[in-house]
Image (cartoon, rainbow, N blue to C red):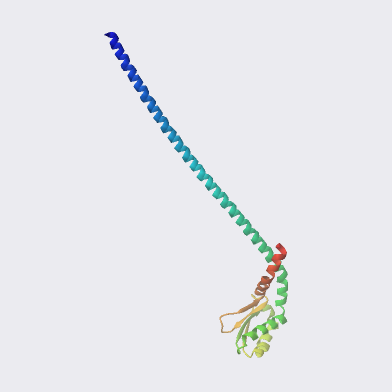
Amino acid sequence: MQNKLQELTDKLYNEGLSKGKQEGEELLAKAKVQADEMIAKAQAEAAQIIAEAQKKAEEVKTKTESDLKMAASQSLAATKKDIETLVVAKMTDEAVAKTLSSAEFVKEIIKTVAEKFTTEGPVELSLVLPEALKKELEPFVTKELAKTLGAGVEASFSKKVSGGFRIGPKDGGYFISLTDETFRELIAEYLRPATKKLLFG
């Protein structure tokens, strides 16, 4: 009887142990599967984060290179333009200043331009002339020019005009400017392309 009881106890113990061991192995396998899934998911997320970071880094690099190229190109263009301006100014400033401060030259241009205003009949004109040429130009404007045009000519002299003149109808709202500054700009426009080619090919 005791042996049977012992056998039954052993059997129950062994069955319980076997069942517990099997359940433990199943839980362990399930935990391992879950752990593998979590690792795989974490690795996929890490790979995606790295890929996005690399893409952004590449975009930043490309944009930086593009910005640097553009800045270098703009800087080079600005430097070339400054050199052109200096060369053209050196070529024109002295000659223009000398020519437009010649009373005889200014008289001839004023006469030619003024006559264009009066092609359809007498027009009263207003002139702004260099203060430095007042002595030479005032008698010409008030007597000779007015007589030639058959109309009144009002002249004022300004220190702001160092050479050349501004002319326009007395009652009109516009002037034609042939000052040393505008003359230099006009000549510079013609000289720039040739100067640019000469300097930079």
Q: Quadrant of residue 171?
A: bottom right
Residue at horizontal 72 percent and vertical 68 percent from the top: 90
Picture coordinates of residue 101, whole percent (x, y): 71, 77
Q: Which of the two residues, 85 or 100, is positioned nearer the viewer here? A: 85
Residue at horizontal 59 percent and vertical 52 percent from the top: 65
Picture coordinates of residue 79, whole percent (x, y): 66, 60
Residue at horizontal 71 percent and vertical 67 percent from the top: 195
Looking at the picture, does residue 10 appear above or below residue 149? above
Quadrant location of the C terminus in the rendered image: bottom right
* Side (left or right) of 13 relative to 64: left
Residue at horizontal 34 percent and vertical 17 percent from the top: 14
Looking at the picture, does residue 73 appear above or below residue 108? above
Looking at the picture, does residue 162 appear above or below residue 82? below
Picture coordinates of residue 135, whole percent (x, y): 70, 82
Picture coordinates of residue 91, whole percent (x, y): 72, 69
* Side (left or right) of 66 relative to 5: right
